[in-house]
Amino acid sequence: MRHAILIGGAVVLGSVLVLAAGCVSVPQQRAAGEAAASIHQRYLDRQASESGSRHELPDLTDPSHLPDYLAYAALNNPGLEAAFSRWKAALERVPQVRSLPDPRFNYRYFIREVETRVGPQRQAFGVAQAFPWFGKLELAGGVAAEAARAARAQYEVKKLAVFHRVKDAYYEYHYLARAIGVIRDNRDLVIHLESVARTRYKAAAIGHHDVIRAQVELGKLDDRLRSLEELRDPLTARLNAALGRDVSLPLPWPKEAPYEPVAVTDDQILAWLRDASPELEALGHEVAGSRKAIDLAKKDYYPDVTLGFEYVDTAGAVRPGVGDSGTDPVVATMSVNIPVWAEKYAAGVREAEARHWAALKDKADREHTLSGEVKMVLYRFRDAARKINLYRDTLVPKATESIKATEAAFRTGKATFTDLVDAQRVLLEFALAKERALADHAQRLAELERLVGRTIPRAPAGPAADKPETKNRSSEGDKP
């Protein structure tokens, strides 16, 4: 019975110290809870997924548009899920480093009992709690919180990268559909020209070599068309990979990729890069965390304090009639570590300062690199817009007029068949160049949005990108 009372007393003492430790760390735990509560709503979705219910992914069918593909990737891309999990893990680190160390329970058994006036001491129970120097826990939590904020920004970086991959593959796939349509239209045109050449040959107006040349041009277009058609599987695999799907799954032809001019200056884009880029934001949090790590390293110059209680089990005195016989002493204990290795702590501070300096330079270097990338992408973006206006509004219409005029002249003998074939080639190359410029423009806009970390405002709608003379038949389905 006596031993049960002793053990119970030790447990009570331990509970008091544990509660004291808990009271000290309540503000830190509350702050950590508030940080965790601010996590993206997607965490709740993930929990629902883990409990058995799955996200309902959008159907990617003929009526699907680019937002459907982006929604699919946001819900299904494994790389994005990995980045989210790293963010979640970083958040869970905050309450760990802000909490006090675990209390320590001590037990001593006297192999040879210590004889005292009031009786022999047989065993002792104790509980001790270490308390780091003032501000250490808060600074450690601050470093972990900055790391969690950096992980959140890295999640945004990954999300933008995934969306860019989807857009880039989607626009390239759309270009393939349009290019196939252009080649098919030109193939029909060459078939028509070949029939005209046959008619002229039968009338002895041209030689047989002109008919052969038309057939050669037709064969070249057939080969080019076959190459483009065989490119469909690799491009669907690329888009499926960005979506997190099996690369062998089929995908319909994209229905649209509108021409979207913007109305912003280079200075505005660069300002958005500095203000909104999640990559620079992540590096900024690394800088802030490394600055707090310097202050944390300086705390090593101060001692940590350990407080505790000890209960000593004492038997009754050997001599009868001794006052306080069998009284169990209760001892309050305190210990501190002695920070005497100054050079060790100075090295820790210098290490933290070097890491802070490296983080600052990494951020400055990355900002310069991103600014250079933005300037190059802006050049390619504006060059694509210039080519769209040139081919769509000038060269393609002129080439269409040229082939009509050349065909009329050929029928009357005022032009050669070589002139007619050359006009057809020019129309083909101009039409393909226009479609390539449209795809490049959309891809560079997607790249700009990835770099600056925000949606770039579009200019008021201008002329439609699609013209009747280059209507893409392949985008109307899988029919030849």
Image (cartoon, rainbow, N blue to C red):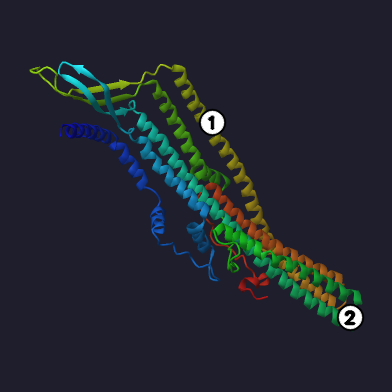
Res. 438 image quadrant: bottom right
The residue singled out by tag 1 in the image is 358
Side of 2 relative to 473 (left or right): left
Res. 326 image quadrant: top left
Side of 132 relative to 158 (left or right): left
Q: Secondary structure at mark 2?
A: helix
**Res. 302 visible in picture:** yes
Q: Secondary structure at mark 1?
A: helix
- Residue 103: % across, % down: 30, 32
Q: Residue at x 39, y 19 (%)?
A: 339
Q: Residue at x 31, y 24 (%)?
A: 305
Real-space Cα separation, disc 2 to disc 1, in angstroms = 78 Å
Q: Residues within 10 Å of mark 1 (few under 14, many from 20)?
A: some
Which is more toward the observer, 433 or 475?
Answer: 475
The quarter of the picture where the N terminus appears is top left
Side of 440 relative to 424 (left or right): left
The residue singled out by tag 2 in the image is 201
The quarter of the picture where the C terminus appears is bottom right
Q: Tell whether label 1 touches label 2 (CB within 8 Å).
A: no
Amino acid under label 1?
Answer: Ala
Which is more toward the observer, 187 or 54?
Answer: 54
- Residue 351: % across, % down: 50, 26
- Residue 427: % across, % down: 75, 67
